[in-house]
């Protein structure tokens, strides 16, 4: 079974600095999708970024980028120029590429990010 | 416009009661999901429907019964509520072939 591990329960970053959140996963599949979701205190789950395993290029979305290392099964999230609004719980998630009964997200345990002014 | 909405946002009830949570999406998606987030913030899939057909049913007690009257709606009915059911329940939707799931605001259920 696939598993997702986030080894940093909490992280802290100064405003305007850069922070990297770690995520590793375990799978025997060669094709899959990876995601980072953000959950601010409002509780809403917000998609930050997604990565298809077959793409070698790392995904980027404005200040958010990933470092996808397929062989190492690592999927870290880098937040540049951190802002106060980035403070949230961040979840890494895995999904198999097929539909049907495999169409579910498998989440890590989350990393709580604090942004210091 | 709200893409995925849930009602109610908060639900406080006594043990043994029956309650329902409703979910609606206006994204035109054909697949909907229920996830449970426990007190430690861990998120886990409960159910998924595609075109009103149940396609994922994780090991969830029979007291939980999802119902999908149409592609845009997925409701969750819980019978004989227990203390351990206290959690945040998230509805999500996606297009079947694509992979990105969009979440509702969550419903915080507290069982006293």
Image (cartoon, grey):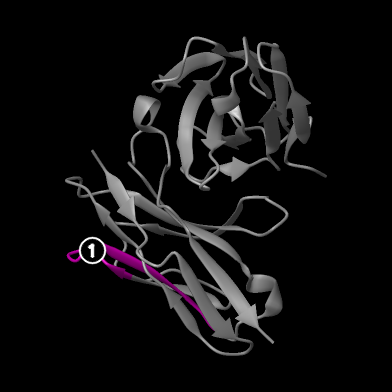
**Residue visible at 62% across and 16% down in the picture:** B81
Quarter of the rendering containing residue A75: bottom left
Q: Residue lying furthest right in this view?
A: B1
Judged from the image, the secondary structure of the residue bearing numbered disc 1 is loop
Q: In the displayed structure, would residue B61 be above or below residue A27?
A: above
Front residue of B64/A28: it is B64
Disc 1: CA contacts within 10 A as few (<14), some (14-19) or many (>=20)? some
Q: Residue at x 33, y 35 (%)?
A: A98
Return the residue at label 1. A70
State the predominant SS element of the stretch in magenta: strand
Give the magenta-colored segment's residue range.
A68-80
- Depth check: give the residue in front, B30 or A115: A115
Q: Give the percent coordinates (x, y) of residue A6.
A: 37, 60
Q: Nearer the viewer, residue A93 or B100?
A: A93
Q: Quadrant of the C terminus of chain B?
A: top right
Where A28 falls versus A69 (above or below)? above
């Amino acid at each position: 079974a696939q598993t997702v591990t986030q080894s940093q329960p909490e992280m802290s970053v100064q405003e305007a600095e850069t922070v990297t959140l770690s995520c590793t996963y375990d799978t025997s599949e060669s094709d899959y999708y990876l995601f980072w979701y953000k959950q601010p205190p409002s509780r809403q789950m917000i998609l930050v970024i997604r990565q298809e395993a077959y793409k070698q290029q790392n995904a980027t979305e404005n200040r958010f980028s990933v470092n996808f290392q397929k062989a190492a099964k690592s999927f870290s999230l880098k937040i540049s120029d951190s802002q106060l609004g980035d403070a949230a719980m961040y979840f890494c998630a895995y999904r198999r590429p097929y539909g049907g009964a495999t169409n579910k997200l498998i989440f890590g345990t989350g990393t709580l990010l604090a942004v210091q002014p | 416009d709200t893409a995925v909405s849930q009602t109610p946002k908060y639900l406080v009830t006594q043990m043994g009661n029956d309650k329902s949570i409703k979910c609606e999406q206006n994204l035109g998606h054909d697949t909907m999901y229920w996830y449970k987030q426990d007190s430690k913030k861990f998120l886990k899939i409960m159910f998924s429907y595609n075109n009103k057909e149940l396609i994922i049913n994780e090991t969830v007690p029979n007291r939980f019964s999802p119902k999908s009257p149409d592609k845009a709606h997925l409701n969750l009915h819980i019978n004989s509520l227990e203390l351990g059911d206290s959690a945040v329940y998230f509805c999500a939707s996606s297009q079947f072939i694509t992979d990105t799931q969009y979440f509702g605001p969550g419903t915080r259920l507290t069982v006293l």
